[in-house]
Structure formats: structure tokens, C-alpha cells
Image (tube, rainbow, N blue to C red):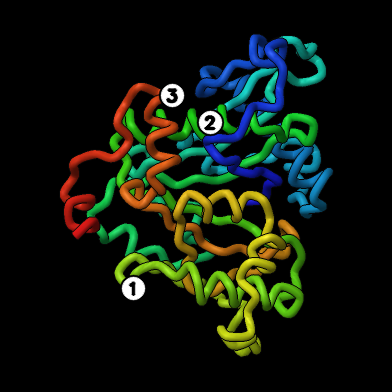
Amino acid sequence: MTSEQILPSPSSNDDDGQDIQDRIVLRLAQTEEEVRAAQRLRYIVFYEEFGAHPPAAVAAAKRDFDEYDQYADHLIIIDEDRKPEDGQIVGTYRLFRRDKLPADKEFYTSHEFDISPLVESGAKLLELGRSCVLPEYRTKYILQRLWAGIADYLATHQIDLMFGCASLQGVSPEAVAGQLAYLHYFHAPPENLCPKAIKDCTAGLHLPAKEDVNAKRIFASLPPLIKGYLRVGAYIGQGAYLDSDFNCIDVCIVMPTSQVKAKYLKHYERQIQKEIVSDSEFNQNFSK
């Protein structure tokens, strides 16, 4: 999940004028053409901007697509003032619920991590992926709108736990050993909710000792998307997966909705006028 997003503080002032706020629309994609437009945006960000290596069919179509797209809900940000030929979709998130996948199909994250602790937890799950925004739209207002859309989705479908992959750029585990050590020492999930990398690229890697990790400095160096998840209260699973096709090293995000920090929870509940955390058995047990 490669992206240059941030999650601003709920108290942050919007840095976009009223003009852009009036022309921005947030909703789920409603047509096949809108899904294809979101795929074109993903291609621009993942392959043209970040240097991922596209399969031949993806390169020919100049769209990032796979077999999973048909089972997803695609959250999209539309700028109605952009010309259709320039692409009006400027941001997107791909969302999966278990009940929208065929019974014999695993979550996308299962290709990289053993997520059986999550699947067997009894939680109602939401997988987040393929998150991207055009560079000129990576502002507080746009990103807050995207997260408000996710919050509304959580409330509508009574989601107990979100998860997905997030990326450190590059394919050298040694180059990000400090970041991986920080995530391991300071953001590990409870053992019963801990995904593990299938081919752990940190196996045999010498990580600095916990007392040698400068937590503040390392946090500041993390990609904006990962920092955003951590600010909310997310955990990071065990190990990391080297994804050479996407030119990145993936970690697994684990985010029980009941663990979202209160300031964010209240902020988005006010925005969507709905309660996000459901009174499910999973939430009751997890909060004990």
C-alpha cells in the first residue's frame, strides 16, 4: 500500500480555500468507468511517481488493476472543476469486507502476511489498500475528507477492526532497520491480533537494541501514511515483506476501531453524525 498521505490532527485548520471545498465530492465509485478512473490514478501514483514495476497488461492499459478490484468498494475523491480528460478522480482508497469476497478467496494482505489471528478473532473486518492521492491534493482538507469517508464506512458496516499493508520505500531492509526496530518495539499488537510476515525480510537482520532507538527521531522519518495510522493508535504486525514489484517493504497495519484515539474518534463521529465503535462481542472482549 504505497502512498504519500498524512493524517492531520483533528484540531488542524484546513489549508484549502472555500473554492476547492465547494468543488470536492467524496463518495464510493458507482460505475465501472469510475473504477477504471481510480485505477488510472493508482497507475500514475504507484508506477509513474513511485517507480513500481507494472505487469505487461497493467503497463499496456496504464491502469493499476487486479482480480481483487471487482470485489472492492472504491472510495473516491472527485474534483468537479477538473476536465474529464485530465481525470476528475484525485484520490482513492480500496476497501474490502469479508462478506464481499468469495468464500474461497483470501484477503489481499494474505499474500504477504499470515493474518489468521485477525480472521479467527471474530471481529468484523475491513481491509484497506491501494491508497493514493495526487501530489497537489495532499492537503489537510482532502485527507481529512478521505478519512471521514472511511469513518462513515466503518459506522455503516459496523466494522470492528481495520487492517492492511503500508509501505517503506525501497527494497533494502538494512536501510530501514531503525524504522523496523521502532515499529517492532513500540507498536506491536497483542499476540492474539498479531499478523506475521510470510517471507520476513527482517529474518537475520540486525536490529538496533530498544534502548538505542531514538523514538521521536525515527517516528519523524516514517512515511506519512504510516505516521498517520500510528497517530490514530494503530499496531504494526510482526516482520516485514519485501515487495520488489512495488519497490517497497511492507508492514501490516492492525487497527481495532475501539482503539482509535479518543480525539480522532470524537472528531469523525461529529463529522459523520454516527457512532463508529459498535457494541459487538469482539469490542466488548477487546476492551476488557
Dot 1 or dot 2: first in sequence order is 2
Question: What secondary structure is found at the residue carrying circle 1?
Answer: helix
Q: Amino acid at mark 2?
A: His
Question: What secondary structure is found at the residue carrying circle 2?
Answer: strand
Would residue 263 be found to the left or right of residue 201 on screen?
Answer: left
**Which quadrant of the view contains residue 266?**
top left
Callout 1: few (<14), some (14-19), or many (20+) C-alpha neighbours within 10 Å? few
Alpha carbon separation for disc pair 3 and 2: 20 Å
Question: What secondary structure is found at the residue carrying circle 3?
Answer: helix
Would residue 158 be found to the left or right of residue 250 on screen?
Answer: left
Q: Amino acid at mark 3?
A: Gln
Q: Amino acid at mark 1?
A: Glu
Front: mark 1 or 2:
1
| Nearer-the-camera pick, 218 or 164 | 218
Q: Establish if 213 lies above or below 145.
A: below
Would residue 268 be found to the left or right of residue 21 on screen?
Answer: left
